Image (cartoon, rainbow, N blue to C red):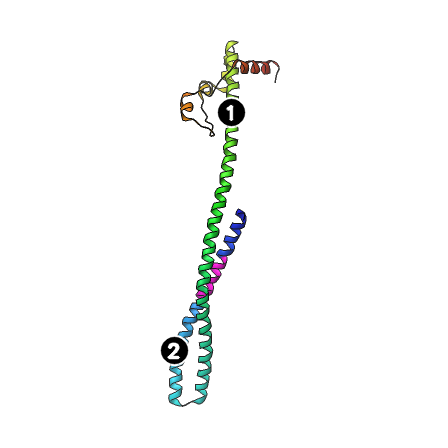
Amino acid sequence: MSYQETVKRISELSKEIEEVKQKKAEATIRARDGEAFLNNLAEEFKKSVLEGGETGIKKIESETMKVTTNLKRDRALLEALDPELVRLQAELDGMIRERDRIFSELAKKWINKAIKDYDQSVESLRLATNRLTACAGLLREAGALPFYLEAVGETVASILPSIKIPKIQNFDIGAYREGRFVYVSEQLKETVKREITEGK
């Protein structure tokens, strides 16, 4: 079952539960009103018997039978709705657990991909930082460092070589605290110099 299917089933079950609760509330009201009406009919029956009105007695007996039948039905419905409500609630609880389990699995996959994307971005950022630092070194050697400082700003230029952005996978706190993440090799300096001179 997919996440969307569980969400859909949860919505259906919630609607069914509300419908059963509504039926139960309506049957409870009808049963209460039916009992009260039966009590009233019983009092009217006593009066009719005392007065000896055969027509009134038959009418009350007929009405009593009709109300009693409806009351039996409502009581039977109430008895049937309770286990149905328990069943639906159990299924809903199970479906919520299943939805949450599926969501957790999907989130785990998403997090793993997000970590991979993040680490790739960190690697790209480190390479870009190293390249900028290599350019600063080349410009310093050529006596043209002010061009670099003007382009990146003096504050950024002062912190760029010491910037630390950790990767998540295989993170080592000791290496993070002690290490430098900006590393300019001679090969990188030559690559940057070639790109500058070739106009890339």
On screen, 42 above or below 186? below
Q: Nearer the viewer, residue 198 or 130?
A: 130
Categorize mark 1 by other alpha carbons within 10 Å: few (<14), some (14-19), many (20+): few
Q: Residues within 10 Å of mark 2 (few under 14, many from 20)?
A: few
Q: Which one is in front, 20 or 56?
A: 20
Position of residue 192 relative to residue 92, above or below, is above
What type is the residue that disc 2 sits on?
Answer: Asn
Up the image or down, 57 lies above or below 128; here it is below
Residue 91 locus on image (x, y percent): 47, 55
Q: Provide residue 76's location: percent of width, then percent of height.
A: 45, 70
Q: CA distance from mark 2 to mark 1?
A: 85 Å
Q: Earlier in the sequence, mark 2 or mark 1?
A: 2
**For the point 46% across and 66% down, which residue is it?**
80
Residue 89 coordinates in the image, percent (x, y) = 45, 57
Q: Secondary structure at mark 2?
A: helix
Using the rendered image of the protein, determine whether residue 21 is visible from the camera's viewpoint. Answer: no
The segment highlighted magenta reads: 15-26
Residue corresponding to mark 2:
39
Say left or right for 195 vs 85.
right
Residue identifier under label 1 = 125
Element on which disc 1 rests: helix
Q: Nearer the viewer, residue 198 or 77?
A: 77
The answer to whether one can see residue 91 in this image is: yes
Question: Residue, x 39% and y 89% (percent of image)?
Answer: 51
Residue 88 in the image, given as x and y percentages of width and height: 47, 58
Secondary structure that dominates the magenta span: helix
